[in-house]
Image (cartoon, rainbow, N blue to C red):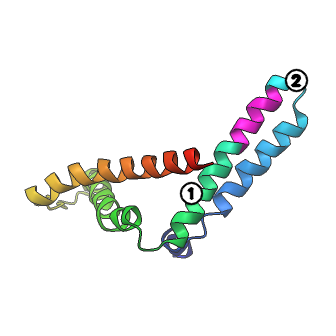
Amino acid sequence: MKWLSDLLLGGIIEKFTGPLLAAYQARLEAETDQQKLAAAEVIKGIETARDIAVAEAADRWSATRLGRLLIVVPFGFWWAAIYLVQILNPWFGLSLVVIDVPPRIHDMALVLIPAIVIGDAGALLARQLKR
């Protein structure tokens, strides 16, 4: 339950700490300029992703955050339920059924999920260009 609350309410910084420390260590251990430059690029990418996660966590009512919570997450649970039922039914001799998403909701999800992903990519690009 703590993991879910951390995911939904922030707490994302810890996910960047390990990779960022490893990248800094790689830069310190780099022997050539090319290795140092590659490590610096990795560090920049991780720091950019961290900054975006912090900004997203600070804005609890952003469109992409709401979209993820209201569209992407339930649609993901629905797909996970389909796979889970396909596994559990033969194992335990059950006849569980996952009710299909109504066609209108399915059609909206097919448009909105890519839009949310594009919105995230656009926000990332805007923040990178701003620097």
Inspect the magenta stretch and tell me whether residue 36 lies in it. Answer: yes
Q: Which quadrant would residue 39 be assigned to in this image?
A: top right
Say left or right for 96 vs 69: left
Q: What is the magenta range?
A: 35-43
Q: Kindly identify the amino acid type of the residue bearing the numbered disc 1.
A: Ile
Q: Residue at x 68, y 51 (%)?
A: 47
**Residue 70 in view (yes/no):** yes
Q: Position of residue 102 (x, y in %)?
A: 10, 60
Residue drawn at the location 41% of the way across and 73% of the way down: 61
Residue 87 visible here: no
Q: Specify whether 109 is left or right of 40.
A: left
Q: What residue does disc 2 label?
A: 32
Task: Give the CA distance from mark 1 to mark 2.
Answer: 31 Å
Look at the image and say whether residue 130 sits in the magenta stretch: no
Dot 1 or dot 2: first in sequence order is 2
Q: Marks 2 and 1: in contact by CB < 8 Å?
A: no
Q: Mark 1 = which residue? A: 52
Secondary element at tag 1:
helix
Residue occupying the point 56% across, 64% down: 55
> Above or below — where is 125 with respect to 97?
above
Q: Residue 21, how many percent across, how many down?
A: 79, 50
* Residue 44 picture location, percent across and down: 69, 44
Q: Could you tell me residue 103's position as x and y percent?
A: 9, 56
Residue plotted at (30% across, 50% down): 115
